[in-house]
Image (cartoon, rainbow, N blue to C red):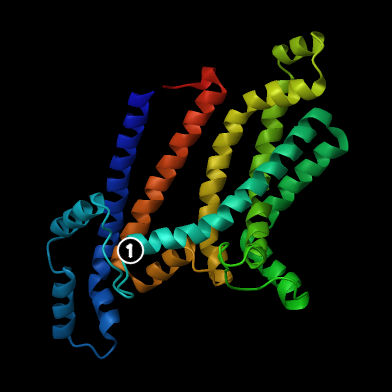
Amino acid sequence: MLLYVLRRLGTGLVLAVLVTLITFLLLAPSFDGIAGNRLGPAATPEAVRALKAELGFDRPLPVQYLDWLVHAARGDLGTSLFTGEPVAHTILQRFGVTMSIVVVALLVTVVISVALGVLAASRGGAVDRVAQGASLAGNLFPSLLLAIVLVYVLSVRGDLLPATGFTPLSADPLRWAGSITIPVIALVATGIAGLTAQVRGTMVDELRKDYVRTLRTRGLSARSVVLRHALRNAAGPALTVLSFEFISMLGGALVIESIFAIAGFGGYAFESSLQGDVPAIMGITLFAVLLVVTVNLAVDLVNGWLNPKARIF
């Protein structure tokens, strides 16, 4: 297993290098514009060239990228061109804010989706129709539209929850819960659609298999058969979908954080892209790739633990 993990991590590092290289090459044509933006519209060509030299943008592109890569391997992602703050520190700080929203949304999504999926598969009838209706509703209403509606209903009209801002959990747990409620609902509403359908589908397949009938003939209760045996075997595909939902929620956080003025990872990525902050964009790209690689590896390891037949290491 150790060799498998090392091989996957090595593949992830190669992927990170390729993705960051492509990102850097796409950003390179905008270096003149970035220097001009920092100096303002009255900047002279001489001043722009001087700033490019100061930032290192006048060096050959391979030299610039390799210099960034060497520093990144040491944990140094540079400093923001516009704030002067270390990019690595800002990413970790902002990511903590985003994770406090995404983790809660993911946990709520798992609880609701597994409950609906298992009940729909094992009982059918009206419960099954409700589960499929919830999945359909989640696909019909994008998180952006739902977030706007929730802000209007719960904040503007109802004055029940704050419309913008974020309160850290350590500062005030109640205000923290209030500040993340609407973003969490918006992410959960779209997240349960795919996961509920996946849990229901895999559970239906498992409950039709021979080993389930064998367990029932041996006198095991329906609850034990469904929860201890069928659900465990159905968890693999559901975990794969859950990893996609996690990445999707991180992407959705970019929009959600912009709407609610939350200083999170998504908001930082959005701001950096608008400003053309090259060190920040490169650091965010590297962090996102490594995060995706880590999540996918963790899901594969958990799948192998849950179902030895699914092991690929």
Task: Name the spot of residue 270 as percent of width and height, x first.
Answer: 44, 67
Return the residue nearer the eye: 183 or 36: 183
Q: Is residue 49 left or right of residue 22?
A: left
The residue shown at (65%, 73%) is 163
Look at the image and tell me whether residue 131 can be seen: yes
Task: Name the spot of residue 22 as percent of width and height, x first.
Answer: 29, 53
Residue 146's image quarter? bottom right
Residue 248 versus residue 37 in the image, above or below: above
Q: Residues within 10 Å of mark 1 (few under 14, many from 20)?
A: many
Q: In what element is the residue under mark 1?
A: helix
Residue ranking furthest to the right: 126
The residue shown at (37%, 52%) is 287
Three-letter residue code for mark 1: Val
Residue 203 versus residue 273 in the image, above or below: above
Q: Quadrant of the N terminus?
A: top left
Task: Name the spot of residue 112 as percent of width and height, x first.
Answer: 72, 44
Q: Is residue 59 left or right of residue 291?
A: left
Q: Is residue 190 left or right of residue 271?
A: right
Disc 1 designates what residue? 87
The residue shown at (74%, 38%) is 115
Q: How many marks on residues?
A: 1
Residue 213's image quarter? top right
Q: Quadrant of the C terminus?
A: top left
The residue shown at (20%, 56%) is 65
Residue 156 versus residue 286 in the image, above or below: below
Look at the image and tell me whether residue 142 can be seen: no
Residue 34 versus residue 168 in the image, above or below: below
Task: Name the spot of residue 252 as percent of width and height, x first.
Answer: 55, 58
